[in-house]
Amino acid sequence: MDLAFFLKKFLSVILLPPLLPLLWIAAGLLLLRRRPRLGRVLAWSGLLLALLLTTPAGVKLLARPLESLPVVQARDLAAGEAIVILGGGQRRYLAEYGGAAPNHLTLERLRHGARLARGSDLPVLVSGGSVRHGDAAEAELMADSLQKDFAVTPRWVESRSRDTQENARFSAQLLEAAGIRRIVLVTHAAHMRRALNEFKAQGIAVIPAPTAALFNDADFDWSSDLVPGPSAAYAGWYATHEWLGLAAQAVRLKLVQ
């Protein structure tokens, strides 16, 4: 793992929940003696941030702008030339499978991509490498799962990428070699904006096919939306991750222009 990639992962741990609000609270408590007013502000701000990121009502405020793109319609598929499914992670070992396998995020993307492939007969590209040395490439696990679990055989297996930027760059190389310039892109709804930007930067036209939105308006329920919970905590982490990713992406793309 190169230094830049390691630093990016390290910063993401610090800037994401659950550590981020805990750091604010800890900083506030440490400052209570010397700077009591600032200490109280930081400690209470950290607590409020923790509630925001673990309460459904708060997380929906973060997730809704990320998930503004509509689901893909059958008529839209006719304009696509290939379906690209992005990896979302892997389980390093599952006893029932005798080794590594796609995690739940990747499986949600594979399920949607397989349905679109069967409904359109478009060729499929799966994209995802390995972050840790010695791990299987996600794309290889995805290809195996697509064939065995969804009866779809991908035409391309892009197994070098470690993040969304590399997903787009290495996938574009395979697609352009095949003369393909317009794709149906499958990833999570919250991740779609960032992925869309990366493929556009590579000169690839994209038909978004988001899946598995974190929340929708039909889920709203005042009796439970103001109560912190584990599902909301995960969604809060995911939404925060995507906002940070979009911010970093905007800076990087601005610098290369």
Image (cartoon, helix red, strand yellow):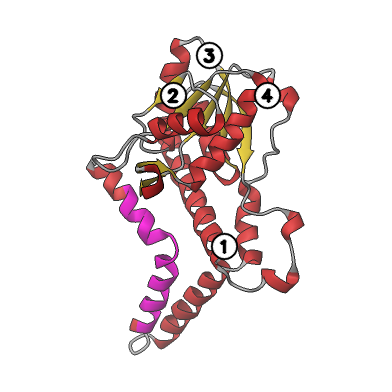
Whole-Å distance between the Cαs marked 3 and 2? Answer: 11 Å
At 45% across and 80% down in the image, what residue appears? 43
Whole-Å distance between the Cαs marked 2 and 1? Answer: 32 Å
Instruction: Mark 4 or mark 3: name the one nearer the start of the chain.
Output: 4
Q: In which quadrant of the rendered view does residue 257 lie?
A: top left
**Circle 3 residues within 10 Å: few <14, some 14–19, many ≥20:** some
Above or below: residue 197 compared with residue 183: below
Instruction: Mark 2 or mark 1: name the one nearer the start of the chain.
Output: 2
Label placed on residue 231: 1
Q: Nearer the viewer, mark 1 or mark 4?
A: 4
Q: Main secondary structure of the magenta part?
A: helix
Asked if residue 224 is among those painted magenta in the image, a careful observer would answer: no
Instruction: Mark 2 or mark 4: name the one nearer the start of the chain.
Output: 4
**Residue assigned mark 3:** 180
Q: Are marks 3 and 2 in contact (CB under 8 Å)?
A: no
Q: Amino acid at mark 4?
A: Gly
Q: Amino acid at mark 1?
A: Ser
Residue 39, image x and y in percent? Answer: 41, 82
Instruction: Mark 3 or mark 2: name the one nearer the start of the chain.
Output: 2
Q: Amino acid at mark 2?
A: Ser
**Residue assigned mark 4:** 119
**Circle 1 residues within 10 Å: few <14, some 14–19, many ≥20:** few
Q: Amino acid at mark 3?
A: Ile
- Tell me the magenta residue range: 8-29
Q: Which element carries disc 1, helix, strand or loop?
A: helix
At 34% across and 55% down in the image, what residue appears? 11
**Residue assigned mark 2:** 171
At 36% across and 61% down in the image, what residue appears? 14
